[in-house]
Image: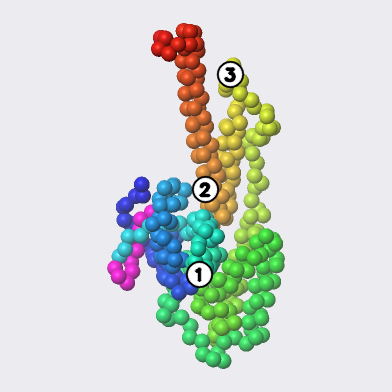
């Protein structure tokens, strides 16, 4: 059950995103976002999305926060921004019947978490009614627009190929979030600022890559068992060399602890949470197996007694 305690936030940022007003708020030093404005902006049903996360609060880390708005303070269910991308991926666009809604869902899946994270880190809070007004002839020249494109392209190409598409999208999203227009429509007098944004954005990639290279290699305390190595033996159900489930739990713990060395950010938190979830599932699963084995053992006991009494109903003592 979701904790209904309402907590006033310390910091709130309005984030204009494709015609909708989203929010980033601070709680315990971490950025959160109210979920309902995102769900409604996509054109989806709020009730079904709320039930999805409310049934597993520990996985999603949702909290009720009081958000200031033009209509007064409102209590909203908020999700950590580091969990936003994972939540959005649980929505299957292929099951959305309306083509317009499906397109909005895909757009939010591709851009929303990056934009929210950018606003939180850069402190940008632009009122969409005060967005840049670009007059005819006041936008970048073709050469200036090409300069921005090549700056971003050059930085992206120095990254691993698997990351290049997402990083390119992040770069354009940062410019769009700041200027409220496509990069070719940025006002000419803001060209230096656009160059600065791209430079700061790509510099962040270099710092993160350098820090990741310096991380210690992941070392497991135990080696995974060979397939078929552990077989159930009624005479020795708990062998001294350990059970496969214990080895799996140990590996999950090692991954969780290793992830704490990663630079702060969504990747670190998601990896840690995934390892913790895997560990919890292993513990829960083995508990259920133990209970099932206990019930089976009891059933076998009574079956033996029944057979020993001639196999007739009512003869068991």
Residue marked by disc 2: 273
Q: Residue at x 53, y 79 (%)?
A: 181
Which circle, 3 or 1, is nearer the viewer?
Answer: 1
Provide the secondary structure element on which disc 3 rests: loop
Q: Choose top left, top right, bottom left or bottom right for residue 165.
A: bottom right
Quadrant housing the C terminus: top left
Q: CA distance from mark 3 to mark 1?
A: 60 Å
Provide the secondary structure element on which disc 2 rests: helix
Is the residue marked by circle 1 packed among few (<14), some (14-19), or many (20+) residues within 10 Å? few
Provide the secondary structure element on which disc 1 rests: helix
Please say if 291 is above or below 68: above
Residue marked by disc 3: 234
Residue 101 appears in the picture as rendered:
yes
Can residue 71 be found in the magenta stretch?
yes
Judged from this view, the residue extending furthest toward the front is: 312
Q: Residue at x 67, y 68 (%)?
A: 156
Q: CA distance from mark 2 to mark 1?
A: 33 Å
Q: Which mark is residue 100?
A: 1
Can residue 228 be found in the magenta stretch?
no
User: Taking 211 as reference, is 81 left or right?
Assistant: left
Judged from this view, the residue extending furthest toward the top is: 309
Please say if 117 is above or below 268: below
Q: Which mark is residue 300?
A: none
Q: Residue at x 52, y 65 (%)?
A: 102
Report the colour scheme: rainbow
Which circle, 3 or 2, is nearer the viewer?
Answer: 3
Count of labels shown? 3
Of the numbered discs 3 and 1, the one sitting upstream in the chain is 1
Tell me the magenta residue range: 63-72
User: Taking 71 as reference, is 147 left or right?
Assistant: right
Q: CA distance from mark 3 to mark 2?
A: 36 Å
x, y percent for residue 310: 48, 8
């Amino acid at each position: 059950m979701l904790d209904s305690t309402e907590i006033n936030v310390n910091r709130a940022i309005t984030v204009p995103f494709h015609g909708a007003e989203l929010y980033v708020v601070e709680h315990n030093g971490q950025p959160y976002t109210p979920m309902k404005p995102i769900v409604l902006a996509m054109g989806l049903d709020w009730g079904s999305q709320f039930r999805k996360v409310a049934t597993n609060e520990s996985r999603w880390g949702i909290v009720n926060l009081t958000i200031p708005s033009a209509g007064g303070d409102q209590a909203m269910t908020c999700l950590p921004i580091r969990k936003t991308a994972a939540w959005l991926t649980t929505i299957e666009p292929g099951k959305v019947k309306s083509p317009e809604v499906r397109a909005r869902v895909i757009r939010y899946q591709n851009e929303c978490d990056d934009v929210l994270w950018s606003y939180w880190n850069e402190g940008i809070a632009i009122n969409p009614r005060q967005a840049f007004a670009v007059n005819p002839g006041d936008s970048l020249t073709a050469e200036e627009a090409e300069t921005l494109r090549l700056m971003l392209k050059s930085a992206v190409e120095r990254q691993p190929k698997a990351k290049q598409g997402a990083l390119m999208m992040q770069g354009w999203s940062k410019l769009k979030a700041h200027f409220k227009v496509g990069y070719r429509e940025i006002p000419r007098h803001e060209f230096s600022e656009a160059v600065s944004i791209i430079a700061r954005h790509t510099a962040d990639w270099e710092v993160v890559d350098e820090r990741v290279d310096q991380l210690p290699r992941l070392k497991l305390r135990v080696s995974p068992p060979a397939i078929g190595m552990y077989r159930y033996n009624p005479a020795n159900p708990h062998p001294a060399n350990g059970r496969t489930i214990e080895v799996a739990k140990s590996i999950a713990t090692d991954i969780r602890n290793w992830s704490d060395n990663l630079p702060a950010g969504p990747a670190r938190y998601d990896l840690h949470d995934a390892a913790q979830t895997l560990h919890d599932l292993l513990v829960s699963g083995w508990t259920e197996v133990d209970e099932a084995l206990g019930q089976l053992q009891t059933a076998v006991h009574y079956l033996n007694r029944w057979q020993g009494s001639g196999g007739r109903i009512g003869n068991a003592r």
